[in-house]
Amino acid sequence: MPETTFNPHEFKAQFPIFDQAENEKLIYVDNAATTQKPQAVIDRLTHFYLYENANAHRASHRLARAATDAIENSRKIIAGFINANDRDIVFCRGTTEGFNLLANGLASQCHAQEEIIITSAEHHANILPWRRLAEQRNMKIRLVPDIDGIPDLSQLASMLSDNTRIVSFTMASNVLGCKLNLESVAQLLKDHPCFYVIDAAQGLGHCPIDVDKLGCDFLVASAHKAYGPLGAGFVYGKQKVLSTLDPYLLGGEMVKSVTLDAAEFNKAPGRFEAGTMQLASIAGFGAAIEFLSQQDREGMHAHEVRLIQHIHKELSSLPAIQLISKPENNLGICTFNIKSDVIEATSGDLAQWLDEHDIAVRVGYHCAQPLYESRALQQGLRISVAGYNTFEDCDKVVRVIREWIDNIEESKTTTTPCSNSILESLQNAKNWQARYKMLMEFGQEERDESIQADDNIIHGCEAKTWLAGSQVDGKYQFITDSESRIIRGLGVLMKHWFNGKDADFIQNFDWETECQKLGLTRHLSASRNNGFRAMILTAQCSVVPTSSDSE
Ligand code: PMP
């Protein structure tokens, strides 16, 4: 194996976001959502606005020529990077727009009863445009079966028929990180007159892409997941094939001649680049690809693989963690759930804890809900690495996760303080960590499944949360329950404030000041603050002041 020249520390030094004082300790492992941008890309964006800003492909003055050259130069760089011809690259805003462009553009070539084959591991961007196409053209969507969530492409051959019209696969899942073996797919499709599309959103920044070897008709990707700017992406397709597609956006610069009755559209790629494009981002996209090409990409890939294997190994030893992803054939993503039978807290609670330790991860369904539903999984927590992450980063992430688990385990044995001392205990906590731990302790036993009715659901709370209230002699009593332990803990605080009080007190209670005093506004994540706010406002709106009672 050749000696690697890739050094994550030197690589990281090229990303100025990590030099900002507030980011000194930041561990950014949300790279599957978007990567950070190197100085070279930031400089390219600035250069465009300082020296080239004009509209491209229109006027012939000096600046307009510079802008056009910038775009066409990016097209060449990107085409070269994926072994395509530069006329085969259509610029768009990103993968999502690319799929919409394709689904709309292919509609007139699709017919009733024809089939679109995707896998269960697709991102919504590679599902929803096809779903609408299927509805419009009375087509069917079929899913390649999976083994433990990983698409089993060996089943594809038996699914193909004369009805197969579109086959659209991800290069790598944004939840599982697994890279699909797409090299063999084109061979299987060669006797079927279908369009073969690849979603390379998660591939572009991590592995080499050769459209010739892949044999696909179309490939779609975004700049921002490959160290490039936000707002730029491309659709690859052979110019000959692309020119058979109906244009998605209609408008300026994509048309040869227009009358009120007819229009003759340009050939690809101009046919699909209507209106003023995000020119600076496209120029920056070229710079990102040049930047990537200058790295030891094999070494970087090997480094990312080692990191993700290390994280999987460490987390697999924790009984509270249920890994959703697997380390094998993984481009850099580890996704997991919290085992609710081992600890009573959600991955959202853990994400918040990590954020408090300056570790950026993502929690949710990651725009891949069918994957979660097929395996009956709760929202997952995703750690996704890039070249600038190090083993120290990964060890810290694992250590902070362990601490969180230990804290919760410990709190099982601690008893919740009696109601009078709730506020006192919170106020006297020595720091925010201790206060957070206390709130988690409050949330430990605080369950009441009897109020889990649809009518009691609090809207505006990310985790499912319920609130029920009753009134005796003008004094209110509230009961709360939530899937999130921290929200249950916050419910205890709200009940401490409101239970036994009358409507006037409840409605006039200045909870915002109280939350600030306790540091909740500053330290809790935006989603938890919103959830707590929704709970309080729901309680406040549910009470009826005595004055209006007597009217
Ligand atoms: N496909 C995959 C596999 C993705 O990971 C993403 C982004 N998470 C997309 C498509 C959509 O990309 P974008 O948001 O850049 O349009």
Image (cartoon, rainbow, N blue to C red):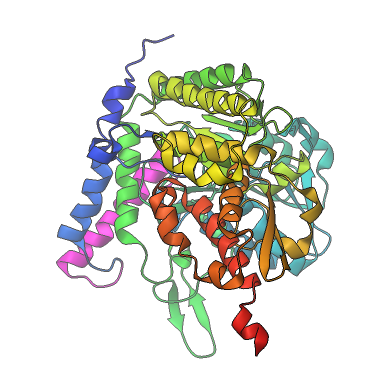
Q: Residue at x 81, y 52 (%)?
A: 450
**442 magenta-colored:** no
For the residue pair 162 and 391, the one nearer the viewer reads as 391
**Residue most extreme to the front:** 473
Does residue 181 appear in the picture of this structure? Answer: yes
Specify start and end residues of the magenta stretch as a single range: 57-85
The quadrant holding residue 335 is top right
Residue 484, percent from left and from top: 63, 44
Residue 481, percent from left and from top: 69, 50
Q: Residue at x 43, y 76 (%)?
A: 256
Residue 348, percent from left and from top: 57, 42
For the residue pair 338 and 275, the one nearer the viewer reads as 338
Quadrant of the frame with the C terminus: bottom right
Q: Residue at x 56, y 66 (%)?
A: 537
Does residue 247 appear in the picture of this structure? Answer: no
Task: Reply above or below: 456 against 15.
Answer: below
The quadrant holding residue 112 is bottom right
Say left or right for 435 vs 312.
Answer: left
Q: How many marks?
A: 0
Say left or right for 154 vs 258.
Answer: right
Quadrant of the frame with the N terminus: top left
Is most of the magenta stretch helix, strand or loop? helix
